[in-house]
Image: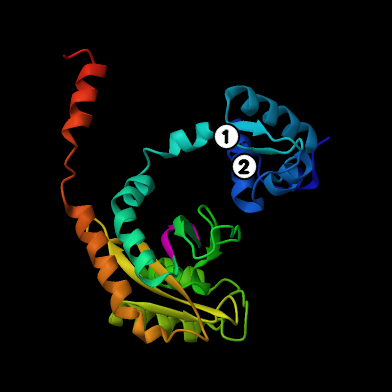
Amino acid sequence: MESTHELTAPKRTAAGRVLALLDAFTQGGSPLTLSEISRQAGLSLTTTHRLVKEVLQWGGLELDESGRYRLSCKILGLASTSRAMVLRERALPHLMELHSRTGMSVHLAVRDRDEVMYIEALRAHPNYTGRSRIGGHFRLHVTATGLVLLAHEREEFIEEYLNQPLKRYTEHTIADADELRTTLHDVRQQGYAVAHQFVSPTAGAVGAPIVGLDGEVTSSLGLTYHVNQVNPSALVDLVRVTATRISRALREKQQLDPRTVDFNRRHAGML
């Protein structure tokens, strides 16, 4: 029997249903029960059970000791060649330096539809598993990295975003379209964003744009601070300089280690 969602939503293709199943893990976290996957993906239990079995046999899912499902390392292997992972590799030395220098949480982010997604997170507390983890999502207007990305989007996208309900996490979250429009203009002009107590009354963040090879801003750098310990204005230059270094690293031609070249040749039977 089909779920109410499946009956009322536009009919999805077989591929669309599989993608919805995989997307459930970005929305609901991992690991998930069969019922949780069904709810997050908007699929009936019968459809979910069948698709989960197929993806499990393919190797895209695995069962943990409690009988819940989680994404397998095969998904990570597929993602390893993506543009986001190439960006992460180029940025990582600079992220580590900023994290070591400040002792604060550092994030590398890209836009995923109307949300910011973290593709790297170096945290002050390694046991943290909240929404700012690697692969975690937040709406664009509530984080410093998200504000930077939103500010550099095309005008049509910004207006479409501003026409949506703007979720408020604290009294400091910007949830008014006109105020947010002004803030985005300021972010573009000054080259950084500060999200002071936007998500939590005890934390804030500074974000700066990373410029890609095509001159477009498709990623951003963020540094999270404790509001009672640090003045965010003291962090702005540090974050902007690090973002500039990452932008420069993206433009530099990557030089392979001679040992890597030798291994590749041997692996291909050229030596």
168 in relation to 21, above or below: below
Q: Give the numbered dot on residue 179.
A: none
Residue topped by disc 1: 72
Sequence-first disc among 1 and 2:
2
Q: Residue furthest right?
A: 1
Indicate the quadrant where residue 152 lies.
bottom left
| Left or right position of 109 against 52 | left
Give, as a three-letter code, the residue at label 1: Ser
| Left or right position of 255 against 87 | left
| Left or right position of 250 against 48 | left
Chosen colour scheme: rainbow
Q: Residue at x 54, y 62 (%)?
A: 132
Q: CA distance from mark 1 to mark 2?
A: 16 Å
Residue topped by disc 2: 20
Q: State the extent of the magenta-drawn residues as a range.
A: 106-114
252 in relation to 68, above or below: below
Counting from the top left corner in percent of width and height, residue 233 is at 36, 86
Q: Residue at x 19, y 20 (%)?
A: 265
Indicate the quadrant where residue 172 lies.
bottom right
Look at the image and say whether residue 239 sits in the magenta stretch. Answer: no
Counting from the top left corner in percent of width and height, residue 220 is at 36, 64
Counting from the top left corner in percent of width and height, residue 28 is at 66, 51
| Left or right position of 156 against 131 | left
Q: Main secondary structure of the magenta part?
A: strand
- The crowd level at tag 1 (other Cα within 10 Å; few <14, some 14-19, many 20+) is some
Give, as a three-letter code, the residue at label 2: Ala
Mark 1 residue element: loop
Q: Nearer the viewer, residue 257 or 84?
A: 257
